[in-house]
């Protein structure tokens, strides 16, 4: 039995399917952005790339957690 993915990563399969880009590409866009605050990045992904709030939030949370 495989362990169920939890947290932001649980959204990744649906993000890739819905928006047609691999998560690694989204993560790179977030890292390359001059924005640094969580909600600024979420708003940017929603406005510029058409992501839903939950998907944008999951990507940003994961990217910012990697920086720590």
Image (spheres, rainbow, N blue to C red):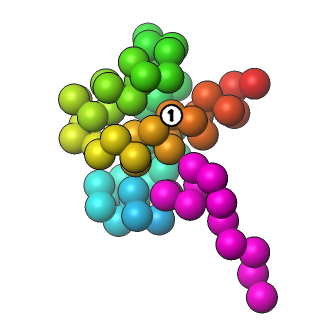
Q: Is residue 7 left or right of residue 12?
A: right
What's the magenta region?
1-12
**Residue that appears at 31% across and 25% down:** 44
Above or below — where is 21 with respect to 14?
above
Q: Residue under label 1, please give it.
A: 60
For the image, the number of numbered tags is 1
Q: Position of residue 7 (x, y in %)?
A: 63, 53
**Residue that appears at 32% across and 26% down:** 43
Q: Is residue 49 left or right of residue 35?
A: left
Q: Quadrant of residue 68?
A: top right
Q: Quadrant of the N terminus?
A: bottom right
Q: Position of residue 33 (x, y in %)?
A: 43, 19
Residue 32 in sight in this render: no
Residue 41 in sight in this render: yes
Decide: few, some or many residues near mark 1? Use Cα within 10 Å; few <14, some 14-19, many ≥20: many
- Front position in the image: 57 or 16: 57
Q: Secondary structure at mark 1?
A: helix
Above or below — where is 63 with respect to 16?
above
**Residue that appears at 49% across and 41% down:** 59
Above or below — where is 7 with respect to 61?
below
Q: Quadrant of residue 67?
A: top right
Q: Position of residue 24 (x, y in %)?
A: 52, 46
Above or below — where is 68 with respect to 58?
above
- Front position in the image: 14 or 28: 14
């Amino acid at each position: 039995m495989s362990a169920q993915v939890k947290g932001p990563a649980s959204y990744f399969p649906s993000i890739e399917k819905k928006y047609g880009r691999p998560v690694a590409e989204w993560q790179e866009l977030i890292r390359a952005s001059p924005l640094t605050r969580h909600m600024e990045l979420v708003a940017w992904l929603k406005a510029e790339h058409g992501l839903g709030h939950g998907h944008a939030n999951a990507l940003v949370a994961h990217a910012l957690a990697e920086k720590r």
